C-alpha cells in the first residue's frame, strides 16, 4: 500500500512506520461583526505553500484579490488600498469532512448567498450525511442560535423565528492538504451524536493559561461526554456514517513544547496559536512559527510592544475575543412584557404617506413671520446671498425672491423662498427645523419605510448592568417600493440585516429610552432610505442617526456594553430629532 509523504519531509524510513494521511487545511478571515468566512480553496492552497517571506499576496491565487496581503506571522490580512487590517486563522479538518469533500453550506442574505464559517459547514455536513432531519446549532461546535431543517433546507433563528433559505454546494475543487506548519496536540474530535431527531456535537476549548508563574503557555482542551448515539440511521448519497460516542479529550501540551512569550524585550511573540482540528477530527492548537523577520504590518507596534512589556510597567496581556452579538437562547415563555410600557403595536404597512402633511407656504405662515423692518446686513444661511438682496432660489407665485422671514421662537432670519425650498426638499411632514440652531417647529417625522417593532424583557443581564435583566428590541422591515417621500420614488429599496436586534438595560432610564424609541418609531425616525455607509449600497434601509446597541455581551465593535454614557447620549440624539418626554 502506498504511503503518503508530505512535501518537504524527505524520505521516511521503514522503521518510522507509515505516515498518517494529512488533514485538510482551511484559512478564514474575520468580519467586522466577529464572524469567520473561509477563503476559496485556491487561496488556501496558496497560503499553505512555503513562501520566501511571511507576507503573501492573494493576487497569485485570484486576480480579484489584488489589494489583499496576508501575513502568516501576525495572522493578519491587509487591504493595501485602505489600510484595513483583519484577523485570519487556520484550521485543520479530517479528510472526509466538508472541506475534504469539497462541500460548503450557504445561507440566503436577502440578495445573495453567504458562506457559513467552516466549523458550521463541518457540523452541517456531518448532520446531513447522517440522515438527521434537523440540527440545533446552538448545541454544537458552531454555537449559533439557529435551527437547521434539512427537509425544507431552511435556517430559523431561535429568538425571533425568522427563517432564511440555506443550500449545500459541491465545489469543483476541494480544500488543500495541510502544508509546512508545526502542530502540537493529539486526540480526536467528539463525533456529532443523533439524539431525538437532532444532531449534537459537544466540545469545550480551555483557554491558554500560564504555568507555574513562568512565561510558558499550555494549550489544552477537553470534551464533554456526548449523549449515546443511535445506530442504524438512514444515510444520504449511499454513504453510511456511524456516529460514535467517543469521550477522548485532547491532552495538554507539555510545557517544553509550548510557545514562549517574551517578557522584557521589544520583540513580539514568535508564534501565534489558533484552535484547529487534527487527524480524527479533534480540535487542537496550531502554532505558526515565525521563520523570518518582522513583517511590515507590525513595524508600527513593535516599539509599543517593547514599552508595554517593560518590567517597570504592570501590564497583563489578555486574549482578544470576537463580539458576543446574541444572548443565550430564550424561549417565548421566558420573555415577559416591559414594566410600565404598553405592548408593542405594528406600524401599518400600507401607510406610506406622512401624517400632518401641509403645503410649504402654510408651514412657513404657521412658524415664521415676514420682516417689516430692513433685514440685517448678513448672508442668508441657506443660499449664502445677502439678506438685503434677492435669494439664490427662484421666486414663487406667492413669494418674492427678496422677501425675508423670521422664525418665531429662535428669531433666526432667512429668505422666504430659501425656507420654502428647504421644506420641499425634505419629508414635507408639516414640521420645520431651523438650519442654524436646529430648533424644531411642529412634530418632526421621517421617511422610514413600513415595518414592525417588537420588544420584551429577557432574563439575562448586560455587561455593566449585572443587577437587572435586558430589554430586547426587534426591528423588522421588508423590501419594498419607495414612496413619494423617498429619494427615488417608484424604485425598489432593499432592507438588509433584518430583523435587527438591539438591547437596553431593564432599568428606569432604560425603560425611558424605550418609550422614546417607540415614539421615534411611530414618527418614522429610526430608519431611512439612502446609501449604506458600511457597504456603499444605494436605495437601502439605513440607521437614521439614532444609535442602537446591537452587541449583547461585549463591546468589541463599539455597539455594545458596558457603555455608561450610552443612555444619556441616545436621549440627546432623540431630542435632536424632536423626540422628548
Image: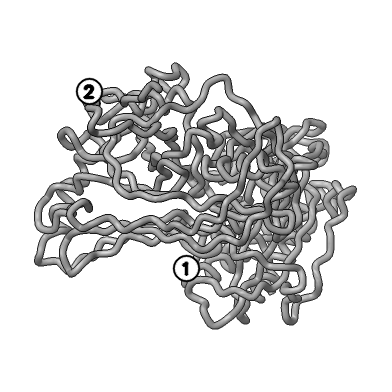
| Residue 216, percent from left and from top | 19, 59
Which of the two labelled residues, at mark 1 and mark 2, occupies the earlier sequence position?
2
Q: Which mark is residue 183?
A: none
Judged left or right of residue 564, residue 193 is right
- Evaluate whether residue 483 shows in this view: yes
Q: Residues within 10 Å of mark 2 (few under 14, many from 20)?
A: few
Q: Is residue 95 above or below residue 568?
A: above
Q: Residue 563 carries which label?
A: 1
- Evaluate whether residue 417 shows in this view: no
Q: What element carries label 2?
A: loop
- Residue at (77% x, 33% y) in the render: 492
Near-viewer residue (253 or 318): 253
Judged left or right of residue 388, residue 180 is left
| Residue 495, percent from left and from top | 71, 42
Which mark lies nearer to you, 1 or 2?
2
Q: What residue sits right under mark 2 in the picture? A: 10
Near-viewer residue (443 or 269): 269
Residue 548 position by quadrant: bottom right
| Residue 277, percent from left and from top | 43, 44
- Residue at (26% x, 61% y) in the render: 317
Amino acid at each position: 500500500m502506498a504511503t503518503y509523504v508530505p512535501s518537504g519531509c524527505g524520505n521516511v524510513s521503514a522503521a518510522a512506520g507509515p505516515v498518517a494521511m494529512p488533514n485538510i487545511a482551511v484559512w478564514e478571515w474575520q468580519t467586522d461583526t466577529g464572524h469567520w468566512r473561509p477563503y476559496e480553496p485556491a487561496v488556501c492552497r496558496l497560503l499553505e505553500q512555503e513562501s520566501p517571506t511571511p507576507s503573501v499576496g492573494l493576487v497569485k491565487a485570484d486576480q480579484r484579490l489584488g489589494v489583499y496581503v496576508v501575513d502568516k506571522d501576525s495572522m493578519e490580512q491587509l487591504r493595501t488600498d485602505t489600510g484595513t487590517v483583519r484577523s485570519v486563522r487556520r484550521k485543520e479538518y479530517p479528510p472526509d469532512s466538508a472541506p475534504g469533500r469539497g462541500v460548503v453550506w450557504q445561507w440566503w442574505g436577502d440578495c445573495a448567498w453567504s458562506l457559513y464559517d467552516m466549523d458550521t459547514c463541518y457540523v452541517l455536513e456531518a448532520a446531513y450525511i447522517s440522515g438527521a432531519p434537523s440540527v440545533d446549532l446552538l448545541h454544537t461546535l458552531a454555537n449559533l442560535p439557529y435551527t437547521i431543517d434539512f427537509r425544507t433546507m431552511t435556517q430559523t433563528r431561535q429568538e425571533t423565528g425568522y427563517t432564511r433559505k440555506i443550500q449545500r454546494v459541491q465545489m469543483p475543487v476541494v480544500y488543500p492538504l495541510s502544508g509546512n506548519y508545526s502542530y502540537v496536540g493529539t486526540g480526536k474530535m467528539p463525533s456529532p451524536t443523533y439524539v431525538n431527531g437532532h444532531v449534537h456535537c459537544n466540545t469545550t476549548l480551555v483557554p491558554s493559561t500560564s504555568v507555574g508563574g513562568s512565561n510558558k503557555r499550555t494549550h489544552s482542551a477537553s470534551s464533554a461526554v456526548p449523549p449515546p448515539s443511535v445506530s442504524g440511521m438512514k444515510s444520504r448519497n449511499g454513504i453510511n456514517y456511524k456516529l460514535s460516542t467517543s469521550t477522548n479529550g485532547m491532552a495538554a501540551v507539555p510545557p517544553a513544547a509550548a510557545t514562549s512569550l517574551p517578557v522584557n524585550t521589544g520583540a513580539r511573540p514568535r508564534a501565534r496559536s489558533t484552535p484547529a482540528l487534527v487527524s480524527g477530527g479533534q480540535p487542537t492548537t496550531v502554532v505558526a512559527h515565525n521563520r523570518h523577520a518582522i513583517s511590515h504590518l507590525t513595524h508600527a507596534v513593535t516599539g509599543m510592544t517593547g514599552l508595554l512589556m517593560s518590567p517597570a510597567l504592570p501590564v497583563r496581556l489578555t486574549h482578544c475575543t470576537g463580539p458576543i452579538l446574541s444572548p443565550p437562547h430564550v424561549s417565548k415563555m421566558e420573555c415577559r412584557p416591559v414594566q410600565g410600557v404598553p405592548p408593542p403595536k405594528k406600524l401599518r404597512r400600507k401607510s406610506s404617506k406622512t401624517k400632518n402633511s401641509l403645503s410649504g407656504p402654510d408651514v412657513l405662515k404657521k412658524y415664521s413671520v415676514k420682516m417689516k423692518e430692513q433685514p440685517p446686513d448678513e448672508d442668508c444661511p441657506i443660499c449664502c446671498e445677502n439678506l438685503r438682496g434677492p435669494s439664490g432660489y427662484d421666486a414663487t407665485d406667492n413669494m418674492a425672491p427678496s422677501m425675508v422671514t423670521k422664525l418665531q421662537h429662535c428669531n433666526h432670519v432667512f429668505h422666504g423662498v430659501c425656507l420654502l425650498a428647504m421644506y420641499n426638499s425634505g419629508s414635507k411632514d408639516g414640521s420645520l427645523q431651523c438650519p442654524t440652531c436646529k430648533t424644531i417647529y411642529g412634530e418632526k417625522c421621517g421617511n422610514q419605510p413600513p415595518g414592525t417593532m417588537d420588544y420584551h424583557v429577557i432574563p439575562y443581564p448586560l455587561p455593566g448592568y449585572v443587577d437587572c435583566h435586558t430589554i430586547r428590541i426587534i426591528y423588522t422591515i421588508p423590501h419594498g417600493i419607495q414612496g413619494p417621500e423617498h429619494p427615488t420614488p417608484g424604485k425598489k429599496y432593499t432592507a438588509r440585516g433584518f430583523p435587527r436586534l438591539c438591547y437596553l438595560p431593564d432599568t428606569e432610564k432604560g425603560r425611558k429610552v424605550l418609550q422614546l424609541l417607540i415614539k421615534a418609531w411611530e414618527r418614522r425616525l429610526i430608519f431611512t432610505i439612502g446609501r449604506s455607509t458600511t457597504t456603499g449600497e444605494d436605495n437601502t434601509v439605513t440607521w437614521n442617526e439614532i444609535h442602537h446597541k446591537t452587541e449583547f455581551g461585549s463591546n468589541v465593535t463599539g455597539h455594545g456594553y458596558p457603555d455608561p454614557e450610552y443612555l444619556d447620549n441616545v436621549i440627546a440624539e432623540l431630542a435632536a430629532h424632536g423626540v422628548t418626554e
